[in-house]
Each structure stands twice: as C-alpha cells, then as structure tokens.
Image (spheres, rainbow, N blue to C red):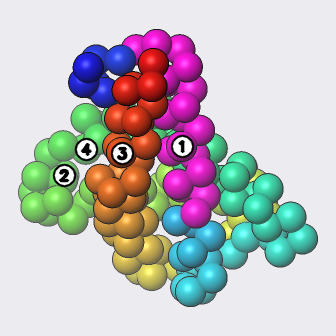
Amino acid sequence: MNTKENTSVPYKILEIIINIVMYALIITIISLFLKTIDIDKQYYGLYAILASAIIYIFNKTIKPILFKLTIPITGITMGLFYPCINILILKLTDLILGNHFNTHGIFSLFLTAILISVIYIMMDELIIKSILKRSVKNE
C-alpha cells in the first residue's frame, strides 16, 4: 500500500506527530547554532513543540493560500519570494508565542527559512517517509 493512499485516522495522527516533532528538532538545532531564532530557555522543549505545532498548522492552512496568491510574484522573482512566505509564518509564530519564541532580522531570517526548508526536505526523505512506510506495513 502506498503511503499517499493511506487515510486512516491513526496514520494521519502519526504523520502529524512526526511532522511536529521534526519541525521542533529543526527549530531547536537552528536556534542553537544561529542567532535568528530564540526559544525561551526555561521550558525550551515545550516552546519548541508549541512553535513547531503552530508552524505545522500554518503550513497546512495559510501557506497554500499565500502560495496561490503570490504565484505571479514568485514567478517573476524566479522562486526567491517563496522563502518570504516562510518568513511570514515564522513571524506569525513569533507574534503568537510572544517572548517565548523570538525571531531576529529579515535578511538572516530569509536564509534561516531556506535552511529550515532544506533540512525538513532532507528529514522528510530520510526519516519521515521511512517511519510512515513501516507503520503502513504493520497495519
């Protein structure tokens, strides 16, 4: 069975949990090495999970709408506008979580958004898809 065809509830829940955990891991790694994202040190893991859950929700709801609205701009800039949508999502997450999740700079955040996308694509190919394939085989 192909993972794209599986629409069972446990599969979808597992997919959401894995994606949120992966985003939390990516955000944590980036916040440790770069100064563009700061996560509250008191409850570091909690705010990383909350931020990744918010980012995941925005990526599933707001991002497709923004992408469709900005296709002409993205086409004119040859794809360079697409990370701006990710910057907007990071800034909205910053706005929602307040002092617990802070983003700094626009130009450095541009590179951070690209880095988050690249790391997520690599993790999706190497880790997420293999976990989801195993879960389908076990059903």
Q: Secondary structure at mark 4?
A: loop
Mark 3 = which residue? 130
- In this orientation, which residue lies closer to the viewer: 127 or 71? 127
Q: Image height check: is 84 above or below 103?
A: above
Find the magenta span and give its range. Answer: 7-25
Q: Residue at x 45, y 25 (%)?
A: 138
Q: Residue at x 29, y 53 (%)?
A: 125
Residue 56 in sight in this render = yes
Q: Residue at x 49, y 24 (%)?
A: 12
12 in magenta: yes
Mark 1 = which residue? 18
Q: Amino acid at mark 2?
A: Ile
Give whichever of discs 2 and 1 has the lower sequence position. 1
Give whichever of discs 3 and 1 has the lower sequence position. 1
Q: Residues within 10 Å of mark 1 (few under 14, many from 20)?
A: some
Q: Is residue 113 left or right of residue 99?
A: left
Quarter the C terminus occupies:
top left
The percent position of residue 95, horizontal first and vertical second, equals 69, 55
Residues at discs 1 and 4 in contact (Cβ within 8 Å): no
The percent position of residue 57, horizontal first and vertical second, equals 55, 37
Give whichever of discs 1 and 4 has the lower sequence position. 1
Residues at discs 4 and 2 in contact (Cβ within 8 Å): yes
- C-alpha span from label 2 to label 1: 32 Å
- C-alpha span from label 3 to label 2: 35 Å
Residue 73: image tag: 2
Residue farthest top in this picture: 8
Residue 70: image tag: 4
- In this orientation, which residue lies closer to the viewer: 57 or 130? 130
Q: Amino acid at mark 4?
A: Thr
- C-alpha span from label 3 to label 1: 11 Å
- C-alpha span from label 3 to label 4: 33 Å
Magenta part, dominant SS: helix
